[in-house]
Amino acid sequence: MAAKEPHASIAGVGKYLPPKVLTNHDLSKLVDTSDEWIVRRTGISERRVADDGVAASDLALPASQHALEHAGMTPEDLDLIIVATATPDMVMPSSACVLQEKLGAKNAGGFDLSAACTGFVYAMAAGEGFIASGVAKNVLVVGSECLTQNIDFTDRTTCVLFGDGAGAVVLKPADGEREILYTFVKSDGSGANLIEIPAGGSRMPSSHETIDNRMHYLKMNGQEVFKFAARTFQSLVHDSLTACGLTESDVGLIVPHQVNTRIVDQAAKGLNIPKEKIFLNLHKYGNTSAASVPIALAEAVEEGRLSKGDILILIAFGSGLTWGSAVVRW
Ligand code: UT7
């Protein structure tokens, strides 16, 4: 798909991380692992964990308020709220409706979007579509996850990777500033079993047996996902630039889904883009699934890593398998 007339702009960004920190050292007391192994194999040093009883909408609220403040808007300005999450407050109603009430966004519609780690990029593309069609003007797009509740803290191959958090952007109609030049989404369901939470849905409803067998926890084929992620990272950057008639030298900053520094290192080898132009904060937060791209974007903005007019590329990939990207002129 080629770039088109911009329909939407990013008006504001925000993030929220729960305060409780779980370090690699803490994990080494739970499973047979070490700070040295986790840092060397993933780049992660610590991650945040939401307290018991805290749900995706609770993390989404401060991130959304932050994004609205940055956009200079009030909750009443919103027409639509999309929450990308794999860990909604409950099966129904949507976390977006719960968030709407907490925010006081009384003029907005809301729904949740499920595309795992790619969820935020899908939600941005969806939000842009609502603006392009005229159905909505101002759209709050949130990625929020309480993923550690679905992590098996007896499984060292997964428990070291994931964390909790939320990030948000406010989209408004294109106004020549921070315009979204391109969005792209794709999936391949033949890889559905590579990252999954098998129980708790209609295929395998919750039962004593599913709980006894630890089927409500995330299962992952790490090596296969690693290969998919490294390959996809490169092609997303390359194809997004090509679609926009840009080259690697035009890139101001890439904000990727935060998974593993080795994936970034491997992908960067095939791209003619200096590593300093790839924003990483996964050493502090691990993989926060749908929240990882908006948290990283908000942090990049806080750190002054984007200047007016910069070409920003957002990329994400994950369970589904799903992948997607957005190109923004900042
Ligand atoms: O959002 C997308 C979701 N996920 C990802 O993108 C994750 C992609 N995959 C990865 O990042 C990597 O595959 C992992 C970090 C999950 C694993 O790293 P790896 O280098 O692929 O390790 P491996 O699976 O090949 O395992 C090597 C060894 C194994 O031991 P043996 O069988 O060689 O004795 C594992 O049991 O490392 C062992 N191992 C660990 N050792 C210490 C696996 N996890 C750990 C651990 N601590 N936490």
Image (cartoon, grey):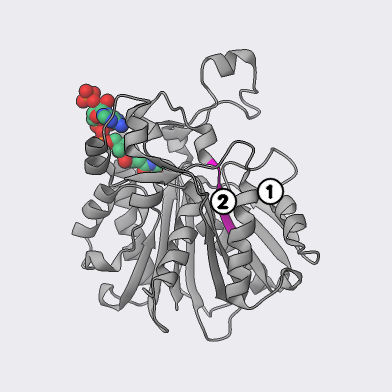
Q: Can residue 141 be seen in this view?
A: no
* Residue position marked by numbered label 2 in the rendering: 144
**Residue at the image position 53 percent from the left and 86 percent from the top:** 176
The residue under label 1 is 95
Q: In this view, does 271 lie to the left or right of 98?
A: left
SS assignment for the magenta stretch, majority: strand
Amino acid type at mark 1: Ser
Q: Which of marks 1 and 2 is nearer the N terminus?
A: 1
Mark 1 within 8 Å of ligand 1, using the beta carbon: no
Query: Quadrant location of residue 161?
Result: top left
Q: In the figure, 40 relative to 28: above or below?
A: below
- Hey, what amino acid is under mark 2? Ser
Q: Residue at x 61, y 46 (%)?
A: 56
Q: Which residue is drawn at 55% across and 63% down?
A: 125
- Residue 282 visible in image: yes
Q: Residues within 10 Å of mark 1 (few under 14, many from 20)?
A: many
Residue at 52% across / 33% down in the picture? 150
- In this picture, residue 209 sits left or right of residue 259: right
Which segment is the magenta one?
Answer: 141-146
Is the C-beta separation of discs 1 and 2 under 8 Å? yes
Residue 102 magenta? no
Q: Which residue lies furthest to the bottom in this view?
A: 176
**Residue 145 counted in the magenta span:** yes
Between marks 1 and 2, how big is the CA–CA gap? 9 Å
145 vs 218, nearest the viewer: 145
Instruction: Give the structural element (helix, strand or loop) at label 1.
Output: helix
Q: In which quarter of the image is residue 236?
A: bottom left
| x and y, in percent, of residue 202 in the image | 66, 28
Residue 177, image x and y in percent? Answer: 51, 84
- Ligand 1 near label 2 (Cβ, under 8 Å)? no
